[in-house]
Image (tube, helix red, strand yellow):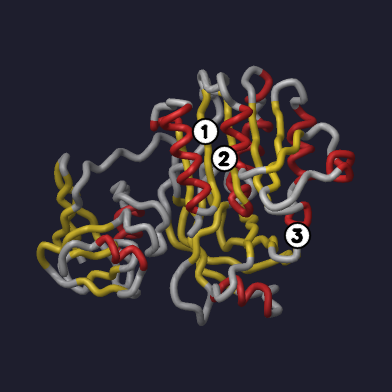
Amino acid sequence: MKISVAARNGAREFECGPGEKILHAGLRSGVELPYECSTGTCGTCKARLVSGRAESAWPEAPGSKYFRSEADLLMCQCVAREDCALEVGIALKEREAGVPSPHALAGVLQDFRRLTHDVVAFEVKLDAPFDFAAGQFVLLTVPGIAGARAYSMVNFDVGTERLSFVVKKKPGGAVSEWLFANDVEGARLGVFGPLGHATFSAGIPKHVLCVAGGSGIAGMMSILSLACRDGHFAERDGHVYFGIRTARDAFFLDELEAFRAQYPARLAVTIALSDEEVTPALCEAYPAFQFAQGFVHAVAGERMKGRYADVRAYVAGPPPMVDASLRLLLREARLPPADIRYDKFS
């Protein structure tokens, strides 16, 4: 089917395969349609159907609360049943240079392991080599479970055949319940990506600020992997703020220490505990880290005062934490929007 999308800066056309989501087809074809979550939650990919017929795989998607007419749809959830003309209320951007186009592939779940009482890690062995930008995510689909879930990659390698993930248990969440309750080793998963705009590229003349809550640290680990590998912190500063509830919820601390130890004069790591006081034992276990009690965005805001010059900020985590961090970075730090990159997990 042929899809035409009219935007404020012109119209774009692309082909959409049978059963393919409109958003996926556009992105695969190089048309940078608007999106954030890609899973039906945020409403960013809302469009208006002008002509043709499209069908939603999830009519009750939370993003539909932003609809203003019966002609509105979510491109991430809709499949075209015939040629369609759509309208979006924004100007379409150009894809950032060097960011690979997304596509569909598959892989096998391997190396499943628990990191904490409610966080697991695993890898997906892909059927083919895969390129992505540090900080991006993919959509994973599990056989027998409706819908896709967005997870950021922990690793970074060019042409990789393995993707690493961390997932926090969500009560009632179909995929997280499946991961925690079953023997999932060897399960075959669908993959679509890479996606996401919270990307880091080597050579940017900016200091790096990472603010992450819970499993939002995943994409930050990918960014830090590339930045450390390419010597970014030899000349630029890095500030990592990782928010967890209690010491029991901590993971990736050894990995963060390994990154910090490569550039001890320029890369600093702060762990913020929201639900308990910092214990001497935790400080003794990681003497090079800084620790604080409080919400991670508040801790970062207090300790970064006067230090935002030439900074690019990356934010990921639960929506309330991301929203609070964005307010801080825009209103208090006064960073330009181009230097604030974020993902929300909802």
Residue annotated with mark 1: 313
The one nearer the camera, 18 or 196, is: 196
- The CA span between labels 3 and 2 is 24 Å
User: How far apart, in angstroms, are the residues tagged by discs 1 and 2?
Assistant: 12 Å
Q: Position of residue 257 (x, y in %)?
A: 78, 38
The answer to which of marks 1 and 3 sits earlier in the sequence is 3
Is residue 157 at all visible to an observer of this figure? no
Q: Residue at x 82, y 32 (%)?
A: 288
What residue is pinned by disc 2?
297
Q: Which residue is mark 3?
A: 115
Q: Nearer the viewer, mark 3 or mark 2?
A: 2
**Foreground disc of the pair 1, 2:** 2
Q: Residues within 10 Å of mark 2 (few under 14, many from 20)?
A: many
In this view, the residue in front, 292 or 132, is 292
Tell which of 118 and 181 is nearer to you: 118
Is residue 53 visible in the rendered image? The answer is yes
Q: CA distance from mark 1 to mark 3?
A: 27 Å
Furthest residue to the bottom? 144
